[in-house]
Amino acid sequence: MMKTVAVLLTIVGIATALDCFVCNSYEDHACADEFQVNSTALQNAFIKTCEEKEKSPFCRKMRMYIVYKDEEIRISRDCGYERRDDRECYQKRSDDYIVDVCQCDDDLCNGSPSLSLAPLLALALPFFVRFL
């Protein structure tokens, strides 16, 4: 009986685990925005199961424009545990860089280049609806 309960708890734990892409384009150019989500090699290299901590994990993608390096762009994908706020995407700025951050709750949702375009599409939607 105890073994059955342990197996069931393990299955439930696996079912609720969140998988995210975890990589940084500075360390591996394959992580850049032209990310091949369906590539088996990249999936094996970059998919990680987020650790369960005190707070529930989420997937995060950060696109950093580094101004002092001729506007170099770096992409970072990882598991997050501290949400800045309830918005899906937000931006942080300084004199040296601009960072667009998007956070999401589905498996592998931080693999899409369109995730960083979500705020722009949301702003443009009323414009296109007017012409329909």
Image: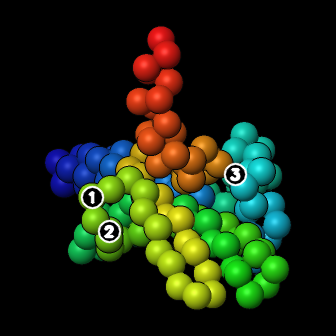
Examine the rendered structure and indicate whether residue 93 appears above or below residue 52. Answer: below
Question: Which mark is drawn over residue 30?
Answer: none
Whole-angstrom CA distance, mark 2 to mark 1, is 7 Å
Nearer the camera: disc 1 or disc 3: 1
Q: What residue is pinned by disc 3?
A: 43
Mark 2 burial class by Cα count in 10 Å: few <14, some 14-19, many 20+: some
Q: CA distance from mark 1 to mark 3?
A: 28 Å
Q: Residue at x 81, y 80 (%)?
A: 70
Q: Secondary structure at mark 2?
A: loop
Badge 2 amino acid: Arg
The answer for how far apart the CA atoms under marks 2 and 3 are is: 25 Å
Q: Which residue is mark 1?
A: 86
Decide if residue 116 is in sight here.
yes
**Image x and y of residue 29, in percent:** 82, 66
Instruction: Identify residue for label 2.
Output: 83
Residue shown at 27% from the left, 58% from the top: 86
Instruction: State how the image is colored.
Output: rainbow
Across and down, in percent, residue 9 comes to: 25, 52
| Residue at image point 58% right, 88% down | 95
Q: Which corner quadrant of the image does residue 76 belong to?
A: bottom right
Is residue 130 or residue 77 the one in the foreground? 130
Identity of the amino acid at label 1?
Answer: Asp
Number of numbered discs on residues? 3
75 relative to 8 in the view: left or right:
right
Looking at the rendered structure, the secondary structure element under dot 3 is helix
Looking at this view, is 119 or 43 the one in front?
Answer: 119
Q: Earlier in the sequence, mark 2 or mark 3?
A: 3
Instruction: Give percent across and percent down for residue 37.
Output: 70, 45
